[in-house]
Image (cartoon, rainbow, N blue to C red):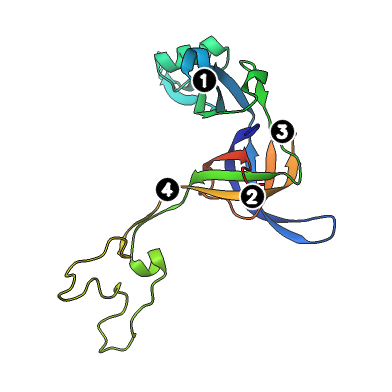
Amino acid sequence: MKKAILARKLGMTQVFNEDGELIPVTVLEAGPCVVTQLKTKENDGYDAVQVGFVDEVEKVKTKDGQGKKSVAHRHGVNKAEKGHFDKAGVSPRKFVREFRFENSGDYKIAQEIKADIFAAGDKVDATAITKGHGFESAIKRFGQHRGPMAHGSKFHRHQGSNGTSSTPSRVFKGKGMPGHMGSVQATVQNLQVVRVDADQNLLLVRGAVPGSKKALVTIKESVKA
């Protein structure tokens, strides 16, 4: 891996390419990210680039002696985190991630990484936390068939037989059962970059990307391109 960036999912839309083909795309606010630390084999046992994304700023409502309200801004990080960012000479960031670049030695502390590291036609892998669905039935979770919907059936949305009667008298591991669905890390590979807007830090990626709106998405150079 030689290039990657942190992004925020803004939603989906559709655009036309040069041939007039309508393409569904996911719009990502990619960067700008800033290098907050460089890890080396000598100091840390491996080479990596640590980057930060989104300024961590909190709005705090205060009152003066006369009871007038005002809004003050402060960085929502603890003392240790603030010291880490101050050492790098950058403002505190909300998201911090590491990338093991093959060319990590080419990066410098406080260097900005923008959306223009990618170009139209590049293949990327997108990683994010999927939408959470809470507790779902086996029909919703695994696509199992329902039973008859007649009044006398009494078997409409149950997951079916769980185990045999005498042999082996147990439920096999991996049996599709109701349970928690979603809210797990997922990666979609080989997505094509359709358009790059460096001025607004936008990446338009063909197809769907995991996660809900405003979710943090990691965009990496595809490993199978």
Q: Position of residue 70 (x, y in %)?
A: 48, 22
First in sequence: mark 2 vs mark 4: 4
In the shown orientation, is residue 65 left or right of residue 210? left
Q: Is residue 191 above or below residue 94?
A: below
Task: Work out how far the residue at label 2 is from the one at label 3, CA to CA, in angstroms.
Answer: 17 Å
Camera-side mark, 1 or 4:
4
Indicate which disc residue 102 carries: none
Q: Mark 4 points at which residue?
A: 184
Camera-side mark, 2 or 3:
2
In the shown orientation, is residue 21 left or right of residue 31? right
Indicate which disc residue 190 carries: 2
Q: What residue type is labelled 1?
A: Pro
First in sequence: mark 1 vs mark 4: 1
Q: What element carries label 4?
A: loop
Q: What residue type is labelled 2?
A: Asn
First in sequence: mark 4 vs mark 3: 3
Q: Is residue 43 visible?
A: yes
Mark 4: give few (<14), some (14-19) or many (20+) Cα within 10 Å. Answer: few
Task: Work out how far the residue at label 4 is from the one at label 3, CA to CA, in angstroms.
Answer: 28 Å
Task: Work out how far the residue at label 1 is from the one at label 2, CA to CA, in angstroms.
Answer: 32 Å
Extreme front residue here? 167
Q: What element carries label 2?
A: strand
For the point 29% across and 74% down, the residue is 158
First in sequence: mark 3 vs mark 1: 1
Q: Name the residue under label 3.
A: 117
Closer-to-camera residue (17/160): 160
Quadrant hosting residue 104: top right
